[in-house]
Image (cartoon, rainbow, N blue to C red):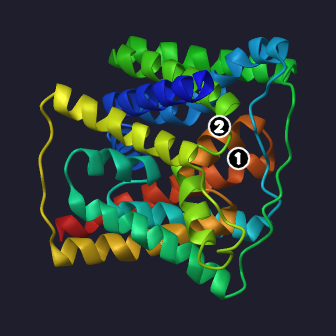
Amino acid sequence: MFSLLISLLLAFLIGWVSQRMGMCLVNASALLLNRRPTLFVSLVSCGLFGLLLAPAYGLLGVSQPLFTPQVAYPLLIGGGLLFGIASVLNDGCSVGTLTKLACGNINKAFTVVGWVLGIVLWYTLNMLPEHKIILMPSISSSHYLLTIGVVLMALLFLVSVHGDKHLVLSSMLLGALTGALYTFEPQWTPSVFFYNLSQMFWMPEQSFISGRRIAIFVMLLVGMCSFTLYRNTFSYQPFDLSKASTHLLSGILMGIGASMMLGGNDSQILLVFPTLNLTSTLPIASIAIGIVLSLLLKRRLARL
């Protein structure tokens, strides 16, 4: 029971901080194009900040479930590009979808529905690769500490230039919170939750989402909604067929892209990228390129 209470508290705080810092890779990329890179660097590096607690976890006999997807490079790159393009079409990545849903945009719920349908479609086409995970029980390499140090210096430089101190502090806090929650519930991320939901369509007798995971997911949304209400930024947007259809389509594409690279951008940032190798870098780099190119195209079309 104590473990569950701690997990729910961590999920609430992650939702609160995510909403506070505007955790959406699409918004961060748009700011990057406007020469304000702090949010982008903060989001991409927040998983690395979670590694700061790795020595403490080692003393307690627990570890973060980092992994490297065992997928061919074309799938990693293609999946990342598709996910990035679809995220711009959706006007929000995986966590960004939930933060906007928590703000009252009911049409974003269709992104979640589309995400599940996209994974089911990819499985139906017999294209779903085996989900192989390489666990990393300990993180003691100086390479990780050096990388974290470089990221810290980069963020401090960005703060001195742009003054967005709260983004740096929020990313460090978010990394610590997500790292702590992984030790209690390794499968808490939204993209993994959506993946397991989709599994019920082809493995109904074997797929099961525990009440604990559902409670953690709900508490994540509660944390987002609570910050929205606290800041009086809740703005209900009723159902709109055109918008809902767009979100459904983009959700399907996001689900396919996530299936190709074994995880949405939340898993890529928090679980994959911190392993710091070529395979783990390709997905998040491809997502970012897909988003940036789509935003540039969107701006160019807007000027016509």
How many numbered marks, from 0 up?
Answer: 2
Name the mark on residue 185: 2
Local SS, label 2? loop
Residue at 69% from the left image edge and 16% from the top image edge: 52
Q: Which mark is residue 248?
A: none
- Residue 179: image quadrant is top right
Secondary element at image label 1: helix
Q: Is residue 189 visible?
A: no
Tag of residue 281: 1
* Residue lying at 12% horizontally and 63% vertically, measured from the top left: 238
Q: Amino acid at mark 2?
A: Glu
Q: Nearer the viewer, mark 1 or mark 2?
A: 2
Percent position of residue 275, x then y: 77, 37
Q: Residues within 10 Å of mark 1 (few under 14, many from 20)?
A: some
* Residue lying furthest front: 1
Residue 269 percent across, percent down from the top left: 60, 41
Q: Is residue 212 left or right of residue 148?
A: left
Quadrant housing residue 24: top left
Residue at 38% from the left image edge and 77% from the top image edge? 249
Residue drawn at x 69%, y 53% as measured from the top left:
282
Q: Amino acid at mark 1?
A: Thr
Report x, y in % for residue 299.
Answer: 27, 60
Residue placed most toward the observer, 275 or 153 = 275
Instruction: Tell me if I can see residue 44 in this picture.
Output: yes
For residue 185, what is the image quadrant? Answer: top right
Q: Residues within 10 Å of mark 2 (few under 14, many from 20)?
A: some
Looking at the picture, how far across and down is residue 288, in whole percent?
52, 51
